[in-house]
Amino acid sequence: MRKAYTSILVIVLIFVFSNIYADDNFDPIRVDGNRFIDADSQTVVFEGLAFSDPDKLVRDGQWNEAHFKKAAEWGADIVRLPVHPRAWRERGQQAYLELLDQGIEWSKKYSMYVMIDWHSIGNLWNQIFQDPMYETTIEETQNFWRIIARRYRHENAVAFYEIFNEPTVSDDRFGNMNWAQWSELVKGITQIIRAYDEQTIVLVAGFDWAYDLTPVREHPIKMKNIAYVSHPYPQKREAPWEEKWEKDWGFVAETYPVFVTEFGFQKDSHVPVIGTVKYGKAIIDYMKKKGISWTPWCFDPDWEPVLIKNWDYEPSTQGEFFKEVLQEE
């Protein structure tokens, strides 16, 4: 009898610990054709906000529940959490994971899903990056996703892993990387993730600072439960934009899900984000027509284009625009 009780206890403990992050209030999200779908096979189009790095928010004294509550009040149903490689190393793995754990719990409290983004910019193949804050290695990137997948594999609220923020290639500054090489990296990282987590959707960015998805037309990455990313800031192409967007990245949404994880505009800023509400209306109308999910950059008063002017959450020009769109939806 004692053995029977012991066996039952072991089974219960295994169930509890293997589902420590499970949350029945959040449907698992998966890919079906060119759609994101929920547990009832209903199409889900996400409309949320891109945060600044949790490490940066801690240093600003703004990593708190109120920040997530405000995002929910704006109308977000998902938040994007960018993890910079340097911040990951300097804060330390365990301390950073504790930040993510807390952010996920705050997101869940306000009924928002979470996207985790490995926020590097540059050429991962040649390991040439835009700034020291983005410097990483293939090994570190793979290990990051191994750790994340193992930790959040049962957490339905963590719906997306954006495996590399902005691949940048074919440039004198960053060197070359072709689509076959990028696909090889993506497949290797995804295989590591799938060893632990078969559910969470992997997001794959295009070239040209995550703008260009034209290689997908002939050479899609043939793996299950992946989707594609574009960052169509206003100056990536001249207006009128729609026909160019369709040719460069929008066509992908006819076959695979697309998530615009960064975009936005600010009149007094830097290339390629200088723009006006004219761009905002054009990109929202285009994405709505195509069924594309989106998170504008950035819910922070320092990282441009900014959605808020200050920590009183006074909206910027683009913040007023996107807040109105989110609340309409």
Image (tube, grey):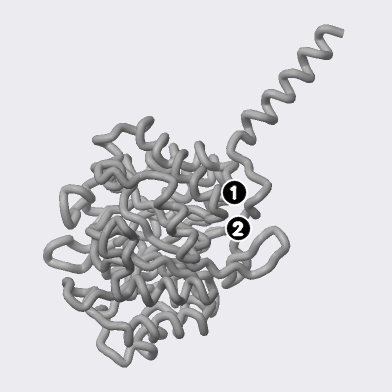
Q: Residue furthest top?
A: 2
Residue ID at (19%, 54%) = 129
Q: Which mark is residue 169?
A: none
Tell me: residue 328, above or below residue 86.
below
- The kind of residue tagged 1 is Asn
Closer to the camera, 91 or 144? 91
Q: Position of residue 3 (x, y in %)?
A: 81, 9
Disc 1/disc 2 C-alpha distance (Å)? 7 Å
Residue ID at (87%, 8%) = 1
Tell me: residue 213, above or below residue 239.
above
First in residue order: circle 1 vs circle 2: 2
Which quarter of the figure has residue 142? top left
Q: Are marks 1 and 2 in contact (CB under 8 Å)?
A: yes
Disc 2 secondary structure class: loop
Tell me: residue 204, above or below residue 327.
above
Closer to the camera, 53 or 196? 53
Identify the residue under disc 1.
156
Q: Is residue 19 left or right of residue 302?
A: right
Mark 1, residues whose alpha carbon is within 10 Å: few (<14), some, or many (≥20)? Answer: many
- The kind of residue tagged 2 is Ile
Q: Is residue 269 left or right of residue 114?
A: left
Identify the residue under disc 2.
29
